[in-house]
Amino acid sequence: MADEQNPIFQIQRVYLKEASLEQPNSPAILLESEQPSVDIQLGVAAEPVADGVYEVSVTATVHTKIGERTVFLVEAKQAGIFEARNIPEDQMGAILGIACPQMVYPYLRGNVADIINRAGFPAVHLAEINFQAMYEQQQQQGLTQ
């Protein structure tokens, strides 16, 4: 019976939930010599799946352009299913917003680099992310808005 009160936190599965690649201006844009600009956007989301079970996803959008024309656009969402039970409510936000994304993100980085490389471009490697700083910034914005 005492085991039922012990905190449980474990990953059950990691999976690529969504991935897309667009090259709307190929092949003409591939002949351009100008270096493209690269814009990378990241997002984190957490959804309850069942009692004590959550899906946490990290989404990356990589948009490269030459001028106003898109070279390629990659969108990918990597997700994980996590079991989190008997954890104090005031700690759940940090677990879902920091610990879980840190576990999922390396898979996302690899998948995004692979998609871009397989499309015929030099891989774009997503930078390491400090999810704690990202989470704290989101918390501060939530309190001030």
Image: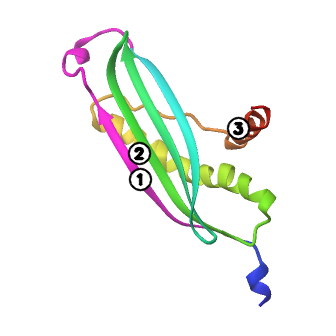
Residue for point 78% across, 58% down: 91
Locate residue 85: give its quadrant: bottom right
Q: Nearer the viewer, mark 2 or mark 3?
A: 3
Q: Earlier in the sequence, mark 1 or mark 2?
A: 1
Q: Nearer the viewer, mark 1 or mark 2?
A: 1
Q: Give the answer, above or below, for where 79 lies relative to 23.
A: below
Q: Quadrant of the N terminus?
A: bottom right
The residue lying furthest to the left in this view is 27
CB contact under 8 Å: marks 1 and 2 = yes
Type of amino acid under label 3? Gln
The residue indicated by pointer 1 is 16
**Circle 2 SS class:** helix
Q: Earlier in the sequence, mark 2 or mark 3?
A: 2
Locate residue 121: give its quadrant: top left
Report the disc number at residue 111.
Answer: 2
Query: x, y (%) of residue 18?
Result: 38, 48
Judged left or right of residue 137, residue 11 is left
Q: Is residue 67 magenta?
A: no
Query: x, y (%) of residue 78?
Result: 47, 50
Type of amino acid under label 2? Asn
Residue bounds of the magenta highlight:
8-35
Type of amino acid under label 1? Leu
Q: Nearer the viewer, mark 1 or mark 3?
A: 3
Q: Is residue 32 magenta?
A: yes
Mark 2 → mark 3, Cα distance in angstroms: 26 Å
Q: Earlier in the sequence, mark 1 or mark 3?
A: 1
The residue indicated by pointer 3 is 138
